[in-house]
Amino acid sequence: MSTTAEHDSASVERDFDVYGDEYVQGAAEVWKEMRAKCPVAHSSRNGGHWLPTAWDDIAAVAYDPENFSSRDIGVAPVPEGVGLLVAPPITSDPPFHTDARRLLLPFFSPKPVEELVEVTRSIARERLDVVAAETGADDGCSGVADAADMYSKHIPVRVIARILGLPESDEPDFTRWAVDVLQSRGDEVERRTNATREVLHYFGDLTDLRRQERADDLPSKLLDMTLPNGDPLANHHITGACFLLLLAGIDTTWSSISAGLYHLAANKTDRERLLAEPELLPTAIEEFLRAFAPVTMARIAATDEAEVGGCPVAKGDKVLLPFGAGNRDPAKFDRPDEVIIDRAENRHFAFGLGIHRCLGSNLARMELKVAIEEWLARFPRFELATEIGRGGIEWGGAQVRGPRSLHIRVGL
């Protein structure tokens, strides 16, 4: 497990804030420095936590549920008086985790995901119509659109709403909840807590409604399922699972679509190559996921005395797993800070790893492929609107990181 030598407390203590601008805007540079000087660091901020930055150390912890628990997986400390969120399977440990995950897997296997391709394509084309109308591109004009706001963020929220049987008219609330829960800073406790309560209340009402009358949606199907011991799923299990699927299915994929478009807008050679060799798109998507990993970290806790990369960790200590750091480890990836769209070997951590590897990875990959495919078909030539802000892009987010605004010029 260890990639580091013995450490004393002074050598591993670092004053870094995963919610601070230095980390959010320049995480890759922070990881690089830590990997060279202190591969496993400890910070007292945000309740205190360890942060390994090497691929092997992150993997070793993720694959060790016996010594590291996921019951309190949120990065931000839980405020006093607020109970832990129950959102199975991600907030559970084996053996219950195994049962909870098995119930959801069939909904995200390749066949049901394939059935959503045309739905996703229709949503993408509808949003591209909006972009074209806003910029005048269909009339032969050149204009600037915020691709993150006008395009990327709408696709995953509408797809997951279809799966959960939610009305499209509630889309603004879904997006606001995802932003408030996953993009809030560490000290924005009230914002994050209020959004969490609103989501759970929303799904609590939906679960009560589906108990009275079933529909062709996931909550109804969960109500008809039982655990291996024959017990039906409790209300908090269903509402928590829906909470997880809604929020995890929005911000992560929205961020990944925007990151892919950002790279292609900023790199004409790669964009033109994908247009000439569309069969490279699946490989390019894996590289976008590696280089711009949307889930920056998950928090777990040591269940007993353990070690992380040779550093002794006390029972109850929190450990942050920065998946993006593993994705840029030069010990595992050649030229890790470059985006190589035909990278042949790509064992990235973008979907997490271990027992909590993202169960929606098939869905996310499909949405990414369709979204970028349709954008390239509609706007084969585009570029960053460099006259706007930081090259037309603003990155954000501590738990989920991606372009929050992405100004792109189309109609060239």
Image: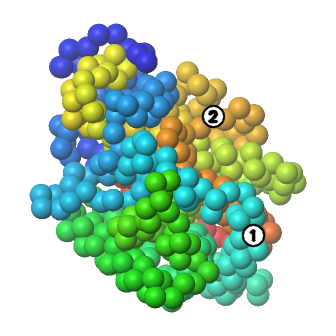
Query: The N terminus appears in which quarter of the rendering?
Result: top left
Provide residue 41's location: percent of width, then percent of height: 29, 28
Determine which quarter of the picture holds residue 32. top left
Q: Residue at x 87, y 54 (%)?
A: 276
| Amino acid bearing label 1 | Glu
Residue sitting nearer the eye, 282 or 151: 282
Q: Judge whether residue 342 can be spotted in this image.
A: yes
Q: Residue at x 29, y 48 (%)?
A: 72
Query: The C terminus appears in which quarter of the rendering?
Result: bottom right
Q: Which residue is mark 1?
A: 115
Q: Earlier in the sequence, mark 2 or mark 1?
A: 1
Provide residue 355's location: percent of width, then percent of height: 49, 41
Q: Is residue 80 left or right of residue 204?
A: left
As drawn, 406 above or below 9: below
Q: Residue at x 43, y 65 (%)?
A: 233
Q: Which residue is mark 2?
A: 347
